Amino acid sequence: MIQSLLIANRGEIACRIIRTARAMGIRTVAVYSDADANALHVRSADEAVHIGPSPVRESYLMGDRIIAAAQQSGAQAIHPGYGFLSENAEFAQAVIDAGLIWVGPNPSSITAMGLKDAAKQLMQDAGVPTTPGYLGADQSPAHLAAQADAIGYPVLIKAVAGGGGKGMRKVEAPADFADALASCQREAASSFGNDHVLLEKWVTNPRHIEVQVFGDTHGNVVHLFERDCSLQRRHQKVIEEAPAPGMTEATRAVICAAAVRAAKAVDYVGAGTIEFIADGSAGYIKPDRVWFMEMNTRLQVEHPVTEEITGVDLVEWQLRVASGEPLPKKQHELSINGHAIEARLYAEDPAKGFLPSIGTLEQFELDANVRIEKGVDQGATISPYYDPMIAKMISHGLDREEAREILAYALNGSVIWPVRTNAAFLINALDYPDFIAGTMDTGLIERAGESLIPPLMPSDEALSDAAHRYARQALAGFRLNAPPQQDIMLSVNGQPVPVHMPIHDYVDQHALAGPKDDPSSSWLTDSGQTWRIEAMRASSTGVAAASNGAILSPMPGRIIAVAVAAGDMVVKGQKLLTLEAMKMEHSLIAPFDGTVAELNAAEGGQVSEGVLLAKIAKTA
């Protein structure tokens, strides 16, 4: 058995691996960048080694530094987690060449499944059903357009080296093909250094179904049933569950057997996932309407839902198999118990187009009644350098509805401040009728649109509850033959809001936790969102609207262009400023016709989140 293990990753997956390794008596070594010097995974490990500056290309993607850290610390093995170098065959081979144990599949298996076109051909040869399409070497636009015509629209263009939705375009009609192809190829070349694409028939009501497989060095391969990862935003998974709703026993037998054949075709060792696309238009998944998409040659982000329904620790299996042991269980010993759902908690603001939200977690309390996989704790700083996923919340129930209700309740009870998260968005997705019915597909979030975006302010009921706390401290407003009233002015995230409320018959139904250092303020949680609430003096008029026309910085960044000057007349939708943040450009526009009454931005200036950059006065 491996005695010491270096984890070549960070965040929640590093913490997850450390937990299992410690339970197995294995010494752990973490690696960290400048930004992660005090991170949770660093503090959790037995030893930690600094590997470079904050940007991933100067630290977590530096394979030679990671191998040197393993040698320096005396680690016997390297676990790559997921992302970063986990599916890099050259890194895997370098680890092996350095005399270390690679906790993952053979480099040859990674290479075989690394390019979508080659992997698809390999699967066809192994008798695994694949989506109708084109895999050829001729990449000329004219030939690709002819192939798309032959397949029939709509078609999907996919980068052969792609992932995470990059280099992927759905094309509805022949007239749109050329532009979509050029865009896809540019993005693929920029992201992966390879502009080759394949074409696939677009599947109606697509469901994303994947099967967990596991192989050992003794020739054994098993599956651990399927997961449904259909709830996605821009091709990124948001909520995953196991088993898949609408999965018949006949279809499960077909796709799980196909997944095992796929793994055996590349002599697979370790944890892997075979991903399928299914036609969900019938309301359930038919055996002949499921096709191979790709293989992920690593542990998946969503692996906890499989663990919850099978009772298996997949990281333990990885470590045992890497140590040369056979799989702990045979296929007939594996079964499904109940239902599990996982929600990915991101530091992002749905109300601002899901922009990443960075800053210090002054409050970070997650409901302890579900399984929590987290990479941060209270006081941690969310930096702009890494993926904004800060935790995963996983529920397990006797059936799907119980698991759904448990997870929604846990998300609702989480308190996170001042970093914004997608918790309320996740609750809305879990409560969406199509999700409740189990008939969702990969387009659900796009179709649901604004209905999933949480409101900018707490509900009136929640504000009344918050105001009542302060009213207790200053009861006033008694009128003969009428219920006592109290006009309370609250500051909600810095915005004044008047609350006119009766004092009697009060029942607190919302979490209102006050910080120890300032009894005049609190964090209010309402449907998964958290606001900073402070009491202000009572309003004599009962009116305190937000400053109309205030243009605030949506996140920290640098002003790269100023298109207006103070006093200029502007029209609704006109670009005022351009902010560069998180390697993206964000245009700030006029909310209505008016005049630039105030301008506090200069080209090249650095700004913080929430800073007033400009103010537009409405045209009379």
Image (cartoon, grey):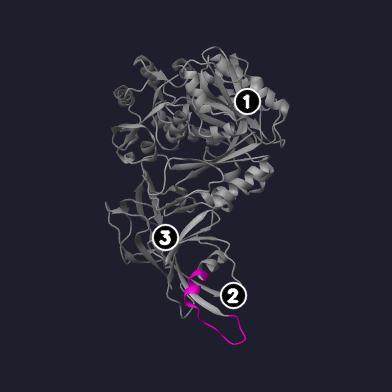
Q: Is residue 393 above or below residue 19?
A: below
**Tag 2: amino acid:** His
Q: Residue furthest bottom?
A: 480
Res 291 label: 1
Residue in the foreground of this view, choosing between 261 and 281: 261
For the residues marked 1 and 3, what is the alpha-carbon distance in whole angstroms?
53 Å
Pointer 1 or 2: first along the chain: 1
Where residue 6 appears, as percent x and y from the top left, is 38, 26
What distance separates the C-alpha of mark 2 from that of mark 3? 26 Å
SS for callout 1: strand
Residue 504 - label: 2
From this viewpoint, is residue 262 visible? yes
Of labels 1 and 3, earlier in sequence is 1
Q: Report the residue at 45% width, 43% height from top.
A: 390
Q: Is residue 257 visible?
A: no
Q: Amino acid at mark 3?
A: Pro
Q: Alpha-carbon neighbours of circle 3 within 10 Å: few (<14), some, or many (≥20)?
A: few
Tag 3 secondary structure: loop
- The local secondary structure at tag 2 comes to loop
Q: Using the image as rendered, state which of residue 237 and residue 342 is in the foreground.
A: 342
Please name which of the two marks, 1 or 2, marks the residue nearer to the observer.
2
Pointer 1 local density, CA inside 10 Å: few below 14, some 14–19, many at least 20: many
Mark 2 or 3, nearer chain start:
2
The boundaries of the magenta stretch are: 468-483
Q: Residue at x 53, y 48 (%)?
A: 367
- Identify the residue position indicated by label 3 in the image: 515
Q: Quadrant of residue 402?
A: top right
